[in-house]
Amino acid sequence: MSKRRKSQRAAVATPKPAKVRDVFVPRPFEGLADEPEWIALRELVPAASASLRLNAELAAEHPDRPVVLATVLPMATPAMARADGTVFVGLQRHQQSGDVSRDLAESLLCALRTEPGGQVQVPPLPGPGPRLQDVLADDVLDVDLHEGFDFWLEPAAASDPTVQASLERANAAVYPTVRLTTSRAAYWCRVPEKAHVRWVLPDDEDAALDALARLGAAGTLPLADETRFAGMFRAHGRLVPVWDLPEDVPATEWEAPVGRFAERYAEALADPTPLDAAGRRARQGLLGRQLTLR
């Protein structure tokens, strides 16, 4: 048999690796008890953590592996398996597929399969498999905000000068952030020369947009006289309105204005009547000031 024919038969006999189809999921955190808070930690908050509970099956398999959700990990790595057994999963990372929930679940499972202290290997495109909704005992997130990323460190690493230098660089990027108590997933932050309130709304996008349009037509979108409605993000299937604030007013002073706005918003959300002409114009104006985050 000729070499050419042999190579042709080998090519026919050797199966090609199956391609992994990447499907975009617009609401990856849908079904989780605290969907807006997951979105806030993923897109808005620089340094925060929250403990996660595994489902009953995984908890029985890994009884000594506490799991911590972190906004970001060193070098934006997807997951870490610390020597003390703690598993860290990073929300903000460089590589991701079209389903953030699947990515995070795969990172978590890879970390659980890694011996404490080992380097976690996570595929860039995980393919079909369980999602966060499948691997966690769902609950409201108890979020801890941090002024820096020292919560990453184990005691043994704290004195390493290389680690300290990396930590200082990461901490330099953290801007002051305060979690407001009058509405879940509402955060005050101060960046150079500006301060903002950003609130991840829990409601359907169209309904939320109509409610904001009613407030816009009524002139009640600002939080207070000194504030300005700056626009909004679309993030993972939810709207995130943003207000510009005076830089020198502390975060605690915005609790009451945000609470009063939440009441106005809830009333507008419950209004069953169609938008009038002013409301429709306000809605179009809001759409023009919208930025999608992915």
Image (tube, grey):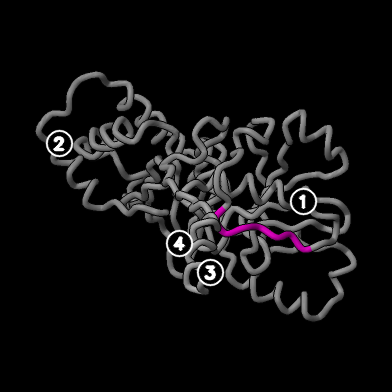
Which residue matches tag 1?
Answer: 87
- Horizontal and vertical percent position of residue 272: 25, 19
Q: In the image, is residue 15 above or below residue 170?
A: above
Comes first in the chain, label 4 or label 2: 4
Give the SS element for disc 3: loop
How far apart marks 2 and 1 lie (CA) works out to: 48 Å
How far apart marks 3 and 1 lie (CA) works out to: 57 Å
Which residue matches tag 3?
Answer: 1
Comes first in the chain, label 3 or label 4: 3
Which residue matches tag 4?
Answer: 247
Comes first in the chain, label 1 or label 4: 1
Q: Residues within 10 Å of mark 1 (few under 14, many from 20)?
A: many
Comes first in the chain, label 3 or label 1: 3
Q: Quadrant of residue 174?
A: bottom right
Please tell me whether mark 2 or mark 1 is closer to you in this view. Answer: 1
Left or right side of 126 for 222: left
What amino acid type should be assigned to the residue bearing mark 3?
Met
- Magenta range: 119-125
Residue 280, numbered circle: 2
